[in-house]
Amino acid sequence: MKRNALTTAVRMVIAGTLAGTLAACGGGGSGGGGSVSGSSDGTSVGAVTGFGSVYVNGTRFETNGSVSSDDGIEREDQLEKGMILKVKGSWDGRGEGRAERVSYDDTLRGPLTGASFDSVEVGVEPDTGTLQMLGQTIIFDKQTVFRGATPDQLVANPTTYRVRISGWRTDNGEFRASYVGANVIGLDFDGPNEVELEGIVQSLDKTAQTFTINGFQIDYSLAVGDDDFDLDELENGIGVEVEGYLQDGVLMATEIEDEDDLFDDDDDVEISGDIYDFDSANRSFRINGVLVQYNRGTEFDDIRESNLQNGLFVKVEGDFRNGVLVAEEIEGRDGDVELEGRVEEIDLTNEVLMVSGIRVQLTPNTLIEDDDDNRRRSRVEDINGFRVGDFLEVEGRQRSTDGGYLEAYTIEREDDDDDDDYELEARIDAINSTTITFMNLEILLNDYSTDGARAGDEVEVEYRRTSGGQYELTDDLDD
């Protein structure tokens, strides 16, 4: 909110307040099974945003500390933020849940063959790009968590790294990475096989015992079916997971399984991911192989039905019936605001940060990352780690209630920025001859051009805080 409105409302409080509140909720290994009073029973599939025990899709799930996986991950303390989990259990509307079973499976695993940034602008650090491996294209963005190597390192020397990817399939057969874990070639991941690839079977030749996934050749002459899957059931168009090793540019499969339904029939379900196979006429789309059907009774949050399209990142809640997820609610999860600025005040009780005059609200869905600190920390430690003066990059949604604020999807602590110039991409709430207002933050125009901008326009602004505590533009508006 606006500086002079929020400054009186948000007070500095001691870090122990939040720590005591959240620590009372328990941490990893706090017990699994059972149900939460008034909760839904089912399955939640989404990326980890915090620990203590694990936060998935905005719910803190208590766990027994164990993880089911074929990829060398057996314990909760081996998980990383960004990894996509399947949590079987119960949860309630307060964001509390209990996990009966936590499962993890790599989406892709193997050596990189290429990496690039989408664009390189002088003086601007790129944060979106693509990775190439096993003939597949993987998109990374601001919400992708990197461990073991930074995007810069991967782009500079891609062929020196093996990676494990946890991500979502997109509309054109590519993947959107939620997590990228990198090891230098020669330092293998824990697991029985060197590579893993999932996708749709194409060009099946049962005589030669080969097929392709997005053009990448797979030889299954030495493979066995896994998890009750019979190799005789292979056919073009089905989704499979393949594990094996590389030989002369061919994936020699040792294990193949089909993409089982993520959910049980009559499950209460929540899942997040990218929309693909969108069909407006039949009111349906897919997320990670799951067919979603919506209807007139489906509620839309932060998105309109008319905005649905391939490539949109959403969370869906509903009931799984006869192999179809019938959506009760579809929530848009793509951010519409970006902010770079300094922490000015902290309210740990309400999980609110004042960042360069903008009220930033944290939620259980907020992913908190450090630019150069990859330690695995609990959510309590994440939040208590904020300090006045920290320079942050924040991405999220612009909210109009309570005068306006920024609901944070991702927050990254950056190395110190010496020039103290702030950047904001957001929707204008009000503008006049002397000021422009975003989320109740009033910025003096300072004789810079607004070039016909009006309330409701999405623009980029650069600004700073004056010695008198006001804010002023440092450049013309950029739409």
Image (cartoon, helix red, strand yellow):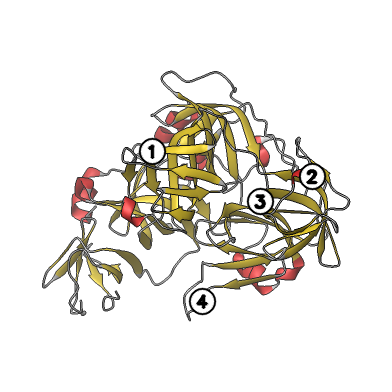
Task: Tell me the distance, in whole angstroms, between the alpha carbons under discs 4 and 1.
Answer: 42 Å
User: Which is nearer the N-term, disc 1 or disc 3?
Assistant: 1
Task: Tell me the distance, in whole angstroms, between the alpha carbons under discs 2 and 1.
Answer: 63 Å
Please tell me which residue lies in front, 18 or 95: 95
Q: Nearer the viewer, mark 4 or mark 1?
A: 4
Please tell me which residue lies in front, 296 or 305: 296
Q: Which residue is mark 4?
A: 119
Q: Residue at x 51, y 62 (%)?
A: 141
Q: Nearer the viewer, mark 2 or mark 3?
A: 2
Task: Tell me the distance, in whole angstroms, between the alpha carbons under discs 1 and 3.
Answer: 41 Å
Q: Are marks 3 and 4 in contact (CB under 8 Å)?
A: no
Q: Residue at x 47, y 75 (%)?
A: 124
Q: Amino acid at mark 1?
A: Ile
Give coordinates of residue 257: x percent, y percent: 74, 43
Decide: is 251 above or below 97. below
Alpha-carbon neighbours of circle 2 within 10 Å: few (<14), some, or many (≥20)?
few
Q: Are marks 4 and 2 in contact (CB under 8 Å)?
A: no
Give coordinates of residue 74: x percent, y percent: 72, 36
Q: Is residue 385 left or right of residue 178?
A: left
Q: Amino acid at mark 4?
A: Ser
User: Mark 3 falls on what kind of element?
Assistant: loop
Image quadrant where one finds the C terminus: bottom left
Alpha-carbon neighbours of circle 3 within 10 Å: few (<14), some, or many (≥20)?
many
Give the number of the disc on residue 107: 3
User: Mark 4 falls on what kind of element?
Assistant: loop
Q: Amino acid at mark 3?
A: Thr
User: Mark 1 falls on what kind of element?
Assistant: loop
Task: Tell me the distance, in whole angstroms, between the alpha carbons under discs 2 and 3.
Answer: 24 Å
Q: Which residue is mark 2?
A: 232
